[in-house]
Amino acid sequence: MSVAEFLRQRAVEVSVTGSYSLHRWYDCEGKLRNFACRTKRVSPFRMIVDVPVVGKIGERVTSYFQDFGEFQCTISATMKSGFLMELDMTRARRAWMSEKLTWLEKKQKDDSIKELRRDARFVPQASHTVLTLADGSSHPCFIIDVSTAGVAISCEYDPAVGTPLAVGACVGRVIRKFDNGFAVKFAEKQQRDDLVRLIVRQGLPQPA
């Protein structure tokens, strides 16, 4: 199915963070690499996800979302920063998925749901930005979530802990690795009002 066809179908515009693996992407130890992803539009049959590494049409994908569980999927269409996945599910699970999506749609319209933690992490609307390393090289990356103190990133590039870099215009250092990405602590705490504008820059000027 094409993206245009899916956009004409009944589905829920919902942002749920998850992870995925492409069956051809392995790390240096021969293990499947996991990347972060985020849903954009979901139905009980298929979903559009925003991703750091776009697979190929027909490629098999294993994905996991805390709200939905694990799926075996097939990519049916690709976009610049994402793809459309066909979900392999039983009829009973599709019925459950339909009820879950109805609940999530109601939940995201509930104004009483507020984030109360200090330095709370949040998910910016723009999922993609650029990492710039000390040598001036740059790598596209996917924002998992962000706070005024740091950001969680998923990226094809896999830096070591301690690597200094800039995420958008925010300078920091890699402080932790996890299954589908890594955490960067900013050198200086950022103002929340400025954070999205600084973090989601699509590119930085390269040195002459």
Image (cartoon, rainbow, N blue to C red):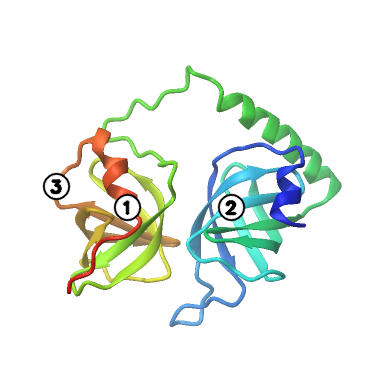
**The residue positioned farthest toward the front in the image shown:** 208
How far across and how far down the image is residue 154, in percent?
41, 60
How far across and how far down the image is residue 91, in percent?
85, 46
Q: Is residue 111 left or right of residue 104?
A: left
* Nearer to us in this view, 77 or 33: 77
Tell me which label, 2 or 1, sits earlier in the chain: 2
What secondary structure is marked by label 2? Answer: strand
Amino acid on which the number 2 mark rests in the picture: Val
How far across and how far down the image is residue 27, in percent?
46, 78
Residue 201: which disc? 1
Mark 3 → mark 1, Cα distance in angstroms: 18 Å
Q: Residue at x 35, y 56 (%)?
A: 202
Relative to residue 112, is residue 70 depicted above or below?
A: below
Tell me which label, 3 or 1, sits earlier in the chain: 3
Residue 49: which disc? 2
At label 1, counting other C-alpha atoms closer than 10 Å, the crowd grade (few under 14, some 14-19, many 20 or more) is some
